[in-house]
Amino acid sequence: MNLNIFFIQLVAFWSAITLLRWRHTPKGWRVIAAILVGVLSIAYGWVPAAAGIISGSLWIALVGLPMMGIVHVNRLMTQERYGRAHRVAQVVRWLHPADGFVEFPSVLRGLELAQDGKMDAAIARLSRHQSNQSGTGRMATALLYRSTAQWDQCRDWISHQLPGKMALSDPSLIGYYLRSLGETGDLNGLIQGLDQFQRRSKSRDPRILNLCRLYAFAFCGQPAQVKRLLEGVLSLYPQPTREFWMATATQAAGADAIAQGQFLALRQRCDRSLQQAIDWRLAQPPVDPQAILSPASAQILAQIEADLAHEHRYDIRTVLARRNAPITLILIAINAIVFAIELWAGGSEDSIVLYHLGGLVPEVVVAGEWWRLVSATFLHAGWLHLMLNMLGFYYLGTFVETVLGSRKFLIAYFFCGIGSMALLTLIATFTGATDQLIVGASGAILGLIGGVGAISLQGWRYDKAKVAGKQFRWVLLCLGLQSAFDLVTPQVSLLGHLSGAALGFLIGLMLFNPRHQPRFAKPRWIKSAQK
């Protein structure tokens, strides 16, 4: 695969996914997807040899760079580094001057001022953007209420002044709405609102969803679940914020004296915004969840806890956050070292170099050089081949190794890599194509995709995990797209990829048993509420 073909596939895939998700994609990205489709089509008709380079360069400028900036801004906001987020957002608004990003830096400046204790200036800044008509305007209004701890007014504004069920479908608003319900003691409204948000929103941002879950668990007095979130998918939040929510959960669980001590100690070393939140919490302590929650709400909360446990086990994004995969990193390092040896020996795309370093030639393997079944999986023909394989290997390998453990992961990796090479050798022997040179870890990496599919299918069947079922469907889609790309891409082994995926699926079924995974007990008071 050369760079031109890679960019053609990248632009076509991204544009197709964006346009297929038309209803759930902001207008700015839809317009960009349509432009890219037009440019790719025209360029492919005029200069097919450069169509990918042309459309790919445009994709980098219109999609790649803005998305990197937006991800960085969101990360900085999560860390509550509003000053840095404001400066980065000023650049992003020029890269993507749509979907509310033009006004967004000013909103971040308001948060920065509030964090520095300049409340009058912060309120004045946020007031400029107040509006019920745009997402940025609604966020600015909610931030005004949050900055001044006016949770009663925030709840009333969202409940009575916004149309319909907007709060339950607007990702930029849902967190403020659910928190306002928890802060004002409406735990049933909080739990049922979270449940409706999960059902209504088809493109849930996991960061927003887990923040809403944090509010639910904290106000319902479940410190263990709050701790799991804050040590896992919400670990980016700064230490004072994490301490605040742990103390809130402790207080709601009934340990009021302990929580008050934690709040008072925290108040001495936090910023002005968090001090106001602590003052509100001390003046308006959480209500007793055992006295407030209805049986229906308790059942929903138990299901949310089960969903969280399933995601902790099966969701690839949640598992990646734990980053417990040393063997994956070692194998990536070995591939990089072998690639450096290729360059030193004369070139990574030189067939003679690849052959002497251990590339797989079926007739040579049949003649007795079986070691090539292993060595060929560590060789790559060019920078692009190596980078794409290692990028996929990092994400897939981290997930599979974390779920299976390092020993089983190593077994699965070599089983898929060597097995796919052996099957290619066998097929080549029967078809007479025994003089071809084969290199790459693609068979092993597609085996990891098959392994993800096996783990997800097992979780769907035995644990009834919704996230596992969704992930299994994504695996099938990825394999279908990969096969389609392989059919139109020269010098790519479709059989090698499919055989690796099939072997990965089989070994995944053998090595992963969800019935041997730890279970998570429900709190006693939730069990009693369900009876």
Image (cartoon, rainbow, N blue to C red):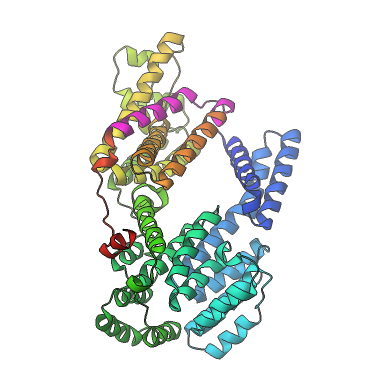
Left or right? Give the position of 118 relative to 106: left
Residue drawn at (33%, 26%) of the image: 418
Q: Nearer the viewer, residue 225 or 120?
A: 225
Looking at this rendering, what residue extends furthest in the front direction? 531
Please tell me which residue is depicted at 52% across the width and 29% down the height of the picture: 483
Magenta highlight range: 485-510
Which x, y percent locates residue 501?
A: 41, 30
Along the viewing direction, whichever of 179 and 56 lies nearer the viewer: 179
Eyeballing the image, is 173 above or below 409? below
Residue 121 placement: quadrant: bottom right
Decide: is 472 above or below 122.
Answer: above
Front residue of this view, candidates 501 and 338: 501
Position of 239 with respect to 119 (left or right) is: left
Residue 167: image location, x then y, percent: 57, 67
Which image quadrant is residue 20 in? top right
Q: Main secondary structure of the magenta part?
A: helix
Position in image of residue 402 (x %, y %) = 30, 47
Whether 122 is among the magenta residues is no
- Asked whether residue 158 appears in the rendered view, the answer is yes
Q: Nearer the viewer, residue 44 or 372?
A: 44
Which residue does the image show at 58% across and 73% down from the upper left?
159
496 to the left or right of 118 = left
Q: How many marks?
A: 0
Residue 124 position within the rendered picture, expressed as x and y whole percent measured from the top left: 61, 86
Residue occupying image coordinates x 73% and y 38%:
41
Quarter of the image with the N terminus in it = top right
* Quadrant for the C terminus in the image: bottom left
